[in-house]
């Protein structure tokens, strides 16, 4: 799947490893929460970056104590109507202070890009069939927001107060 970061498609250094598949000896890997819990020590011993994949039934607090060891937290969006990943992204950023990559995986749609960004996601595994035009349009749709959010962008009100003569 193509990876979108900072509004651009980039090479993905991470490899998703299913629970039943052997972990490669080297390279950055993303594993499921169950595997992380059972093989934490051996995964860290490898010396390469490790990430955890959370299903929508999991919560940010499931990995809160391990965030210092994780290079990425991948949050699954099984269907576009399931908003639990949005909540987890926001909690990872605001409640747990996570500064690493929060990646959206699964049913990631261009129409929801800005909402996900505002909640704290900063990387998006997009479907191979999606056109760059769709994603470019989503990235450029809105440049100023009225309310503060987890992405740290200034709100319209704070920008207005910084402007001389406003």
Image: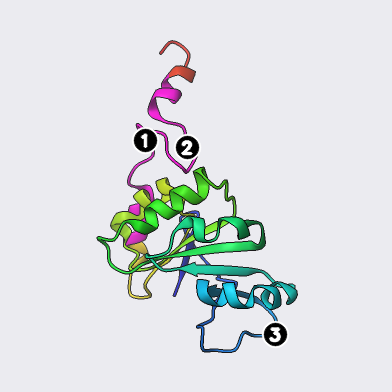
Quarter of the picture containing the C terminus is top left
Depth order, front residue of 40/81 = 40
Q: Position of residue 47 (x, y in %)?
A: 74, 73
Depicted 61 relative to depicted 30: above or below: above
Pick the residue in front: 151 or 55: 55
Asked if the residue at tag 2 contacts the one at tag 1, i.e. Cβ–Cβ closer than 8 Å, the answer is yes
Disc 3 to disc 2, how far (Cα)? 39 Å
Which residues are the magenta region?
A: 134-160
Secondary structure category for the residue under label 1: loop
In the rendered image, the residue lying farthest to the left is: 81
- In primary-sequence order, the first of circles 1 and 3 is 3
- Spatial separation of the CA atoms under disc 1 and disc 2: 8 Å
Residue at image location 67% in from the left, 69% down from the top: 49
Tags 1 and 3 in contact by the CB under 8 Å rule?
A: no
Label 2 crowd bin: few (<14), some (14–19), many (20+), radius 10 Å: some
Rendered image: mark on residue 25: 3
Above or below, 34 against 98 in this view is: below
Which quarter of the figure has residue 35?
bottom right
| Tag of residue 145 | 1
SS assignment at label 3? loop
Quadrant location, the N terminus:
bottom left
In the displayed structure image, the side of residue 54 where residue 100 appears, left or right: right
Let me know if residue 14 appears in the view.
no
Number of the front mark, 1 or 3 = 3
In the visual, does 16 lie left or right of 145? Answer: right
Q: In this view, does 97 lie to the left or right of 45?
A: left
Residue 29, label in figure: none
Judging by the rendered image, the residue that carries numbered circle 2 is 153
Determine if the magenta segment contains residue 148: yes
- Mark with earlier residue (1, 2): 1
Q: Going 53% across and 62% down the picture, which residue do you hit?
A: 73
Q: Mark 1 Cα within 10 Å, few/some/many (few <14, many 20+)?
A: some
């Amino acid at each position: 799947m193509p990876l979108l970061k900072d509004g651009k498609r980039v090479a993905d250094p991470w490899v998703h490893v299913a629970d039943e598949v052997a972990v490669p000896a080297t390279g950055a890997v993303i594993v499921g929460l169950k595997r992380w819990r059972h093989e934490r020590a051996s995964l860290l011993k490898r010396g390469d970056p490790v990430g955890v994949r959370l299903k929508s039934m999991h919560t940010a607090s499931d990995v809160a104590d391990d965030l210092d060891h994780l290079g990425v937290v991948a949050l699954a969006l099984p269907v576009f109507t399931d908003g639990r990943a949005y909540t987890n992204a926001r909690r990872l950023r605001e409640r747990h202070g996570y500064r690493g990559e929060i990646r959206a995986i699964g049913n990631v749609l261009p129409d929801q890009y800005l909402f996900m960004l505002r909640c704290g996601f900063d990387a998006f595994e997009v479907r191979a069939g999606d056109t760059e035009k769709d994603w470019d349009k989503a990235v450029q749709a809105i440049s100023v927001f009225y309310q503060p959010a987890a992405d740290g962008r200034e709100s319209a009100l704070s920008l207005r107060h910084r402007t001389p003569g406003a």
